[in-house]
Image (tube, rainbow, N blue to C red):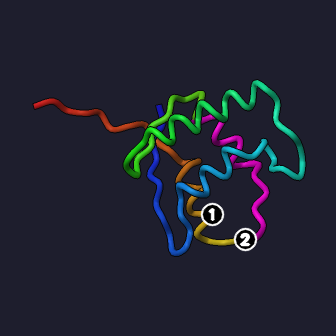
Amino acid sequence: MKTFALNDRGQLKARDLLNEIVKQPIGGTGRAATTLDQMRLDIRLMDKLEAVAGQCIELEDADWNHLSAKVRSFPFAFADRDILAFCDDVLNAGEPTPKTGS
């Protein structure tokens, strides 16, 4: 499992950017289309992201690996520190902290 926070920065809305990256084929719309198998993985990710009410997202390793591949290959239109920080948040996701019971 991997977990990371969706931190808004300035005008960058992390959840919006994440949804845009997930909806696009790997490498962005200018490079390729999506396959049926990739579409299934993307929709699985979208369903998980929609189900999260807060800022902290927890994904199974396979889902995080798919998301990481999409983030790494997404063709951003310009260089921006806030976008880079967002990408680092996703790519540097850590293990969830164990929950302690009372």
Look at the numbered discs 1 and 2 and tell me whether their residues touch, using CB distance below 8 Å: yes
* 41 vs 50, nearest the viewer: 50
Q: Amino acid at mark 2?
A: Ala
Q: What is the C-alpha distance between the residues marked 1 and 2?
A: 8 Å
Q: Quadrant of residue 75?
A: bottom right
Judged left or right of residue 34, residue 66 is: left
Return the residue found at the far bottom: 10
What residue is at 66 percent from the left and 29 percent from the top? 41
Within-10-Å neighbours for mark 2: few <14, some 14–19, many 20+:
few
**Residue marked by disc 1:** 84
Judged left or right of residue 14, residue 26 is: right
Return the residue found at the far left: 102
**Residue marked by disc 2:** 79
SS for tag 1? helix
User: Residue 78's spot in the image, x, y percent?
Assistant: 76, 70
Q: Which residues are magenta?
A: 64-78
User: Residue 52's spot in the image, x, y percent?
Assistant: 42, 42
Judged left or right of residue 42, residue 13 is: left
